[in-house]
Image (cartoon, helix red, strand yellow):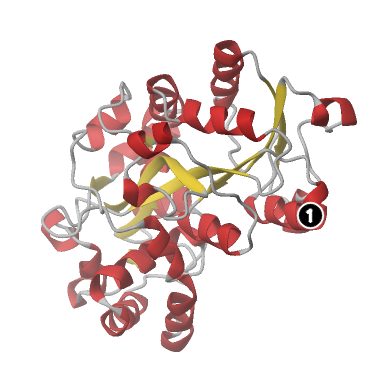
Amino acid sequence: MTRSPISAAYAAVVTTLVLGSTAAMAQDSINIYSARHYQTDAALYAGFTKATGIAINRVDANDAGIVARLKAEGSASPADVVLLVDATRLHNAEQDNLFQSIDSPLLQQRIPAYMHSPKNTWFGFSTRARVIVYDPKRVKASEVATYEQLADPINKGRVCLRTGTHPYNLSLFGSVAVHSGDATTEKWLAGVATNLARKPQGGDTDQIKAVASGECAVAVANSYYLARLMRSDKPADQAVAKAVAIVMPNQTTTGTHMNVAGGAVAANAPHKAGAVKFLEYLASDAAQAHFADGNNEWPVVKGAPMNNPALKAMASADFKRDTASVADIGAKQVAVQQMLDRVGFQ
């Protein structure tokens, strides 16, 4: 299916499948509302159906569209499973009571405590490292070894970022606030804003390309965007990937921030048992390997198989990850947004 940017309001009604009454009520199927827009996930869904005999009816939209649809449908919603991307979005949906708590010893055992809600309403299943990308001809790795150094005077005029209020950055900034406190984080954000080479714009791939082109010398991006370029069969993409270097930040301190993609059982799920089975399947070795090899994401289950050459080139499997509670990071978003406003960070 061809993907294109869509507004949140329109996204709420865009589906890959119109859920008819028969599909919505069938006991051998579940209905998934997904913000994961990756063609490679078709194999993931097929694997679940093959393993369980439970068919999947899927609604695709962006995160805002899914949340809007769930709110509009209320108790009549046919959604069983909700898949969202980013800690901020998962936290917000939980606060809006769009999920329900579930009791799954398997998920409790497989998913690290910091990667799921304390209320057991949502669980993280894959992550993307928030890496620092830099131009090795202009910048030393030692000058960008930590997120804190993005505010260092040595990096003045070097830094490119997407908008500060994008959930990816809100999560990163929230993790800094969890570790360093609000006052220190606000001062750091002011320093980062001072060091920007241009007005925040574009997506993560645009930041990587800006470093490769020389428009800036340092950027922040989720690792799977760089992995896509590294694994692309297009010469232009490969050239971009070869022109930049990366560091996994904060390896000697708090660890690299990991942006999470997660799932939950919808608050009014008509097929709760099937929904729980699906989430448990996402924690299986087979599904975890798919996240890594099929979509360039880091597995959350320790020791899960991974055979992705791009991820292996970035870091060893045991690189130090930030283990601050994803729920705590999501809860910091309002405070961080207020900091961004005060320091003039767009």
Above or below: residue 315 compared with residue 131 = above
The mark tally for this picture is 1
Q: Is residue 158 visible?
A: no
Label 1 Cα neighbours within 10 Å, binned few <14 / some 14-19 / many ≥20: few
Q: Which picture quadrant has residue 174? A: bottom left
Which residue occupies 40% across, 24% down? 293
Q: Would you say 101 lies left or right of 343 here?
A: right
Comparing 81 with 171, the one in front is 81
Residue 190 picture location, percent across and down: 34, 82
Which residue occupies 18% across, 57% down? 250
Residue 262 picture location, percent across and down: 49, 44
| The N terminus - image quarter | top right
Which residue occupies 70% across, 44% down? 61
Q: Is residue 311 visible?
A: yes
Q: Which picture quadrant has residue 322? A: bottom left
Q: Would you say 182 lies left or right of 168 here?
A: left
Above or below: residue 51 compared with residue 139 = above
Above or below: residue 166 compared with residue 289 = below
Residue 277 picture location, percent across and down: 55, 27
Which residue occupies 22% across, 54% down? 249
Where disc 1 sits, the SS reads helix
Residue closest to the far bottom: 342
Q: Which picture quadrant has residue 187? A: bottom left
Residue closest to the far right: 21
Q: Which residue is mark 1?
A: 74
Comparing 135 with 338, the one in front is 338
Comparing 166 with 32, the one in front is 32
